[in-house]
Image (cartoon, helix red, strand yellow):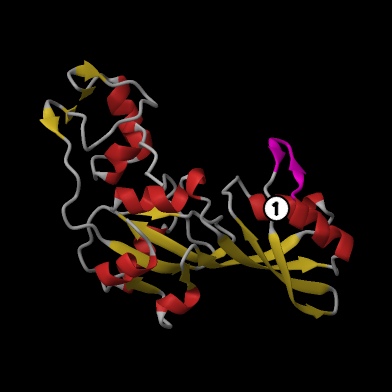
C-alpha cells in the first residue's frame, strides 16, 4: 500500500520546521509555498514531486532520521511543550538520555496524561505517517483494569464494535487476563485512534477504566524496550519490523 500524502503542516512538523500548530500559523501568514503558489492549510503535498518553500527556501527531508521507543509514565504529557511548564515526553526522554542533545522529535501514538505505556518519538515523517494514519490500521493493544467483572455480553459487544457519539467503532479483540475481587484486567486491541477511545468504549458497555497501559503498537511491544524506559531504535530493527 502506498503511503497517503501528508498535509503540508504535518510535513513541515516532520521536517523539523515547527510544531503542527505553529506550521499552520506560518501557512496562514503566507510564508509557505507549493510549486510557486501560496500553500493553504490542510493542503496535501507529495514531497517527492512538489517544490515546497518556507521563507523562499526549500524544505528538505531529514537525512538521518532518529526514532526512540519509550515507556511513558503516568503524569507525563504526550506533547513537545506545555504552556504550564508541565513535564512532557521530550523532557522525559532528555532525562533518560542523560541530557544528550537531541534533534527535534515528535510524539507518535499519544497517550492521556493519566495513562502509561509505549510511545515513539521520531523525526521520521514516513514512519510517523505509517504508524498513525487510519488507512494502515496499525493495531494497538492496551492492558486495562476496570471496576467490576464485565459480562460475556459486554465483551461480545466490544468485539462487534460499539456506538460512540461520532459513530460505530471497528470490532475490538478482547482477552481476559485476570479477575481479582472487584477488578478485572483485560487486553483490548483496536485499529483506530479516536479520542479516549478505549475508555469511552468501556463506559459504553458499563464499565470504568481505572488503569490503562499501552503494551503494543503495531510490531513494537514493551519487550522491545529491553527493560529500559527509553531506547534508540536501530535502522535494522525498523527495517525488519516495518516498511518505512
Numbered disc total: 1
Q: Residue at x 81, y 80 (%)?
A: 180
Quarter occupied by residue 12: top left
Which residue does the numbered mark 1 point to in the structure image? 171
**Is 28 on the left-hand or right-hand side of 64?**
right
The boundaries of the magenta stretch are 161-168
Residue 81 appearing in the image: no
Most distant residue in the bottom direction: 227
Task: Tell me where residue 99 appears, x and y as whole percent.
Answer: 25, 69
Quarter occupied by residue 140: bottom right
Task: Tell me where residue 181 appears, x and y as whole percent.
Answer: 85, 79
**Is 196 on the left-hand or right-hand side of 238?**
right
Dot 1, crowdedness within 10 Å: few (<14), some or many (≥20)? some
The image shows residue 71, relative to residue 164, as above or below, that is below
**Is 235 on the left-hand or right-hand side of 204?**
left
Q: Residue at x 13, y 33 (%)?
A: 58
Q: Nearer the viewer, residue 122 or 85?
A: 122
Q: Residue at x 19, y 45 (%)?
A: 61
Most distant residue in the left direction: 57
Task: Tell me where residue 125 appears, x and y as whole percent.
Answer: 31, 48
Q: Residue at x 35, y 58 (%)?
A: 243
Amino acid at each position: 500500500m502506498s503511503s497517503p500524502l501528508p498535509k503540508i503542516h504535518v510535513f513541515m512538523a516532520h521536517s523539523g520546521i515547527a510544531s503542527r500548530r505553529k506550521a499552520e500559523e506560518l501557512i496562514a501568514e503566507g510564508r509557505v509555498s507549493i510549486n510557486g503558489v501560496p500553500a493553504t492549510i490542510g493542503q496535501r503535498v507529495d514531497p517527492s514531486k512538489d517544490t515546497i518553500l518556507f521563507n523562499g527556501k526549500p524544505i528538505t527531508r531529514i537525512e538521518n532520521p532518529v526514532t526512540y521507543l519509550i515507556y511513558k509514565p503516568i503524569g507525563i504529557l504526550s506533547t513537545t511543550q506545555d504552556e504550564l511548564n508541565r513535564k512532557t515526553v521530550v523532557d522525559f526522554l532528555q532525562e533518560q538520555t542523560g541530557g544528550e542533545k537531541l534533534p527535534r522529535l515528535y510524539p507518535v501514538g499519544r497517550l492521556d496524561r493519566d495513562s502509561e505505556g509505549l510511545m515513539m518519538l521520531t523525526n521520521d515523517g514516513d514512519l510517523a505517517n505509517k504508524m498513525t494514519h487510519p488507512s494502515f490500521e496499525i493495531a494497538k493493544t492496551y492492558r486495562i483494569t476496570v471496576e467490576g467483572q464485565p459480562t460475556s455480553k459486554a465483551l461480545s459487544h466490544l468485539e462487534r464494535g460499539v456506538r460512540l457519539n461520532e459513530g460505530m467503532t471497528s470490532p475490538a479483540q478482547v482477552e481476559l487476563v485476570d479477575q481479582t475481587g472487584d477488578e478485572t484486567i483485560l487486553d483490548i486491541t483496536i485499529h483506530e485512534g479516536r479520542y479516549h477511545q478505549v475508555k469511552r468504549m468501556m463506559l459504553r458497555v458499563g464499565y470504568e477504566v481505572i488503569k490503562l497501559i499501552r503494551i503494543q503498537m503495531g510490531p513494537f511491544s514493551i519487550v522491545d524496550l529491553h527493560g529500559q524506559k527509553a531506547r534508540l531504535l536501530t535502522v535494522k530493527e525498523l527495517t525488519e519490523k516495518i516498511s518505512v
